[in-house]
Image (spheres, helix red, strand yellow):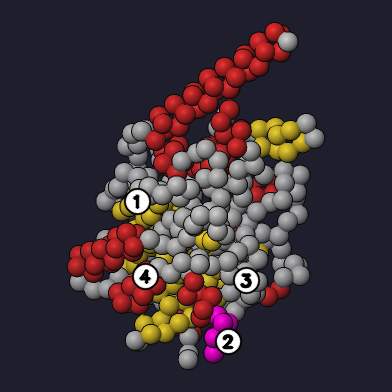
Amino acid sequence: MKKITLIFIVLLVAISVSVIGTGLLYNNLEDTVVAEKPLHQLEFSNGSFTILQLSDFHEWAGKETDTGIVPQEFLKPRLTMFLDQVLSDVHPDLVILTGDNIFPLSFLWDFLGTVSIDTLRYIADYFEEKEQLWTFTFGNHDTESTVTKEAFLSSISTYNYFIGEQTESSLHKSFRQEINIQGQANRVGNYSIPIYSDDKVKFNIFILDSGSYYQPGNGPRDYLAITPEQTSWYCSEATRLQEENGEIIPSLLFTHIPFIEMSELFESYPYSFSGIYGGISNSSIRSNIYEECFNNKDVKGIFFGHNHYNSLTLFEERDNHVIMMGITPQAAGESYDDLTSDMYGRVITIQESGDFDTYIYSSNDSSNNHIFLGQTISYSSFNP
């Protein structure tokens, strides 16, 4: 009995030390000062700029086995294969990851180690090796372990090809909102990134952290929406860009959870739409950002992830302003042994004129999901 008690105490102390040590590590990561690194000004090339949106990697550098989880030192091979393929085919100027990049499989392993942090670093390592500019925001799964959003960002802020560190530069603005509500994380992955032509801003990219779940009392885990504070920041950025450049700067907005307005629009949509409708999984809470996008007349496209098998793309027009909304299906491998899963991304090519077109990229041209493929949609093609 004494021996069992002693073993229990030793284990308890070991776990406590690990947890404390891990906590100190995460705190140190959050306080990391970003070293000076080269600034990358996004530029139109020959009048165009290409964005590759990828969503819902659901990566976690741990392999489930019969004896438990074994930490891994690389991404799932299927994801790496897909990234090699799509980067080679598309040659994007910027890659945007729109949430659920990390899907923690074990709360314990992020207490005892740094598996989630390591996973994001493996993603950053990949893009660094490819010399590919990229950025990301958070989804509802990324922080379901013990890792804060601030720690995630700090862990990759020094990477040369990552745009989005919390310390602003002349080439990107960021916004952080502290949330003091139990069960809800801070809104950290919010960015405003301009695209230039001849040192003049011609287009802008907004990226917003859509949060995760809203759970009043013992109610359902409904999905959250963009907050009033985030909306105010977006409006201030839209105003700043207009004042500094003497005109409304056309923009695209990226976030994880679809707006409730997309679901409402689809239910009464009088025009033809493109892609597969497989449910929208939208926020159950209304945000005022959608109305402000129409008021400001700058945002021309809003793109989401979250619903893994939906490629729905449609338009809404109000007061002579049109917004395209689209959901991008997932790019997720089933496991470390999976080498065949179909993966998807969204390619968006912007023109200096302010027009853009988009299509869904598939890893498998012979996939049964033909409706995902071959449907290039132009913003200017909307004809009510």
Instruction: Name which of mark 4 and mark 1 comes first in the sequence.
Output: 1
Instruction: Evaluate whether residue 133 shows in this view.
Output: no
Left or right: 239 in relation to 177: left
Instruction: Evaluate whether residue 120 shows in this view.
Output: yes
Which residue is the site of mark 4? Answer: 288
Q: CA distance from mark 1 to mark 2?
A: 38 Å
Residue 198 position within the rendered picture, expressed as x and y whole percent measured from the top left: 28, 63
Quarter of the rendering occupied by the N terminus: top right
Q: Residues within 10 Å of mark 3 (few under 14, many from 20)?
A: few
User: Looking at the image, do the residues carrying marks 1 and 2 touch, with CB atoms under 8 Å apart?
Assistant: no
Choose between 88 and 217: the one closer to the eye: 217
Residue at image position (76%, 54%) is 340
Q: Secondary structure at mark 1?
A: strand
Residue at image position (48%, 52%) is 138
Residue 350 position within the rendered picture, expressed as x and y whole percent measured from the top left: 43, 70
Q: CA distance from mark 4 to mark 2?
A: 26 Å
Residue at image position (75%, 49%) is 338
| Disc 4 residue type (three-letter) | Asn
Q: CA distance from mark 3 to mark 4?
A: 23 Å
Mark linked to residue 279 = 3
Mark linked to residue 272 = 2
Q: Which residues are magenta?
A: 266-273
Instruction: Name which of mark 3 and mark 1 comes first in the sequence.
Output: 1
Q: Residues within 10 Å of mark 4 (few under 14, many from 20)?
A: some
